[in-house]
Image (cartoon, grey):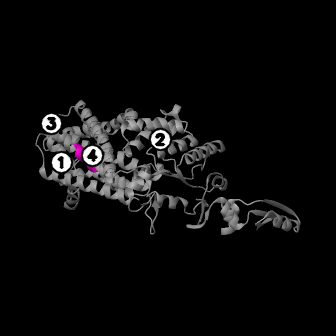
Amino acid sequence: MVVLRRSFGKFFTSRLVGPLLYLVAFGWGLGRSIQVDGGNYLEFMVPGIIALGAMNTSFNAVGVNLNISRLYYKTLDEYLIAPISAAAFVSGKVLAGSVRGLIDALVILALAFLFGAHLAVGGWFFLVVLLTCFVFSALGVVAAMVVNSHEDMANFSTFVILPMSFLCGTFFLPDRLPKVFGFIIDVLPLTHASYLLRALASGQGIIPLSLAVLAAYALISFAGGVAAVRAVR
Amino acid sequence: MLGPNGAGKTTTFRMLTMLTKPSGGSALISGCEVTRDLRKVKKEIGVVPQHMNLDQELTARENLELHGRLHKIPGDQRQQRIQELLAYVELADRSHDLAGKFSGGMKRRLMIARALMHRPGVLFLDEPTAGLDPQARRNIWDLIRRMNSEGMTVLLTTHYIEEAEVLCRRVGIIDRGRLIALGTPAELKKKVGEIVVEVLNHGDTEYRFFAGREQALQYAGSMSGNVLIREANLEDVFVELTGRKVGD
């Protein structure tokens, strides 16, 4: 938190760039001529880019930083020789990543309102955002511990995070894709984060199956993070 | 632990400090087995790695604060200890500066302070003066001597011969992953001969070791060309035991 407070200005302004571009390009530009299920495309897209932003920010905040700290700065050693459990370490990292992801989601929400989006945002909405941040922060821990070079960390983002960014119900509904793609996309966590946030923002309420899938991913990725930290020695 | 680069000093350190799992064998620190009694060993050891692994984005004080919290040192004691240690390593006036802005010597001193935060019984220093200028190196030497004179067991690795000679009561020479000699510097030198005669012959130097000065003088007198008589050092011990120089 000390580091985040110290570099908050830089972090905050950098969080504005991506969402602004998405909102201008897909909201104002492309989105004016598109309707989804009879509704406004901007309001369709905003929950998707909140899920996307939460994923990217929390994954990068934990995964990229921790990978550099393990392989380059070696600050991870300081934690490995301290009398703390792997679970405590992963909890700290996940919490730090989730705070950053949550800030990112709030920035996108604020921008979306400025762009004229009408969204029903309540407690469940933020809980799902938090759960999404949790999943991808913990996945960041796993990747940082397993991947053995900065280049491969970038490859991990390219092959795992980037396809999810575009295909998991963020900018369009995956039911328009061929069935085989639809099945793969349906098992990915970001799909369920997008579905949940979109349903909640449009006032339809929670989707129990998607919530269960996201919660299961949270448990699995946290357990994976703990196992990966234990195995890194 | 003295040995050339790649001899296995850091790997041995990493095994003793539980950062690398040993493939076999056992090691005891203050009666605790390093692969079994992890928590006890972690409390008992302080580690200063070769790599400058301070958090560059935190101040000197915050780096110590973080370490104190990781070791669950209660608030009041933690603050008092931070004050004491910053003064001990002569960084009290820089306590609010970011660690990333420190010179190499200051970073190393801060890392030593950090390792001492939880009052360990054994301090591990991996190449504590590697990459430092002569003045910074002497400051670190003084600090190590002071800690040792106050009762701290200090285990250090080095590939600098003079560092081992000046600082260590007991020296283990390690080469290609094996401990090839262990003893006080005097004992090790006795093993090969305390007096060395160097004979320069057509660009090659030949080394002969003798137990006493008289035998060395006698030998030197019988040689033609440039001859140097001197006391043996740990490098001579290394060369004699391995057939190579430390830097080779």
Q: For mark 1, give the secondary structure.
A: helix
Asked if the residues shown at circle 2 and circle 3 are in contact, with their CB atoms under 8 angstroms apart, the answer is: no
Which chain does the numbered disc 3 sit on? Answer: A
Tell me the CA gap for discs 1 and 3. Answer: 14 Å
Instruction: Say whether disc 1 or disc 4 marks the residue closer to the N-terminus.
Output: 4
Do marks 1 and 4 both belong to one polypeptide chain? yes
Write down the residue under mark 1: A195
Residue B189 is one of the magenta-drawn residues: no
Callout 2 environment at 10 Å: few (<14), some (14 to 19), or many (20+)? some
Q: Is residue B182 left or right of residue A109?
A: right
Write down the residue under mark 4: A133
Of the 4 image quadrants, the one containing the N terminus of chain A is top left
Of the 4 image quadrants, the one containing the C terminus of chain A is bottom left
Task: Compare residues B150 and A120 and report the one nearer the observer.
Answer: B150
| Residue in the image at 82% along x and 67% along y | B215
| Residue in the image at 32% along x and 40% along y | A100
Q: Which residues are magenta?
A: A129-135
Q: Position of residue A176 (x, y in %)?
A: 19, 54
Mark in the foreground, 1 or 4: 4
Task: Compare residues A165 and B241 and report the one nearer the observer.
Answer: B241
Which chain does the numbered disc 1 sit on? Answer: A
Asked if the residues shown at circle 1 and circle 3 are in contact, with their CB atoms under 8 angstroms apart, the answer is: no
Q: Position of residue B192 (x, y in %)?
A: 71, 67
Q: Amino acid at mark 4?
A: Cys
From what the image shows, is residue B104 above or below residue B16? above
Q: Check the image and name the residue furthest to the left.
A: A204
Do marks 1 and 3 both belong to one polypeptide chain? yes
Q: Quadrant of residue A6?
A: top left
Q: For mark 3, give the secondary structure.
A: loop
Tell me the CA gap for discs 2 and 1. Answer: 40 Å
Write down the residue under mark 2: B56
